[in-house]
Image: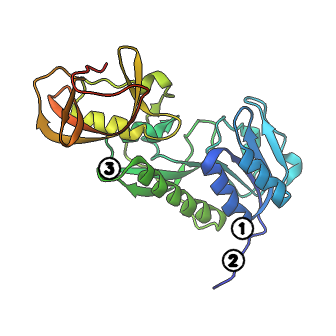
Amino acid sequence: MNPVHKSSRRTVLFIEGEQGLRTLNIAIALTSVILVVVPFGYDNVEIANLCKKAGIPLIVRRKGEPIDLASYDVDVLISSQYQHKIDDSEFSSAKIYAVNIHASELPKYKGKHSDVWALLNGENHLGVTVHKLSPEFDGGDVLHIEYVDIDDTMSNRAIYSNVMAAVDRVVRMVCEERLDSAAHHAEIPSIYWRVRTLNDSLLNWRLSSRNIFLFVRALSRDPIYAYTYYAGLKIVVKAVTAVDDESDELPGTVIETSKGLFVVCGDSKLVRLDEYACEGTMKAGMVLH
């Protein structure tokens, strides 16, 4: 096995969550990480523990309170799943480059929860984008997009496993300076997608069976799942399968056959309830809302 070449580039990471943790692990192996910054108010215990183990200073940064990086002699700044806007004074301190790793295709899916919006929209791929940091949120020049193909046989877990593998590949490209320095200017509209709230996870059974499938799959990731109600009882729906069978019952009506429980959708087609959770018992005749 060939030894890993570790760059002497002095790297600062602005990170959060699982994507941030994976970025840190790779950066430690490939560069000289001199500082890690995490956002205040988020649970980043694993990142903190890894920094402590590796002897890397950690700063918890509050939103809107830039850090003075002038004394750190920064070569490279990498942002990965960082939750707050990075100030111009911070990213301009990097002598070689400052980039963000955005787990969606840019400029088509800017903003928060853009990967969820892409799944809701029925895209046949997701994109992990590396772009230069700029004063405009998610607006810097795109340097590389790593695409992840999607089909209907893939669960949310399988999709995000592939997305995280793509993130790993992209982080290595950044750390090893294998990015094309020329910007990619895609001929597609620049769109900002809004933050989703828990209220956005309420199922609307008047949608088509196809859209119900996309909705449930896009939200099948802890702690956010699609949900519905029956007589005040909350039912969390984690997986469904769209089938060709039809019914003239009202949308939301539960039907039971030898193959399981099904729900009627707005196009009169059915979805099978493959995985759900509730305190009571689901049975035929219920009308979910």
Whichever of callouts 1 and 3 sits on the residue coming sooner in the sequence is 1
In this image, 13 relative to 145: left or right? right
The residue that mark 2 highlights is: 4
Quick check: 148 left or right of 214? Answer: right
Residue 92 versus residue 34: which sits nearer the camera?
A: 34
Few, some or many C-alpha atoms within 10 Å of disc 1 (few <14, some 14-19, many ≥20)? some
Toward the viewer: 264 or 180? Answer: 264
Q: Secondary structure at mark 2?
A: loop
Q: Nearer the viewer, residue 261 or 65?
A: 261
Please indicate whether residue 91 sits to the left or right of residue 153 in the image: right
Q: Are marks 1 and 2 in contact (CB under 8 Å)?
A: yes
Where is residue 128? Give x, y as percent: 49, 52
Q: Of the numbered discs in the image, which one, if any, rests on residue 1?
A: none
User: What's under tag 2, amino acid-wise?
Assistant: Val
What element does badge 1 sit on?
helix
Residue 137 percent coordinates (x, y) = 58, 36
Identify the secondary structure beneath mark 3.
loop
- Residue extending furthest right? 71
Q: CA distance from mark 1 to mark 2?
A: 8 Å
The quarter of the image holding the C terminus is top left
Which amino acid does the dot numbered 3 rest on?
A: Asn
Q: From this viewpoint, is residue 187 visible?
A: yes
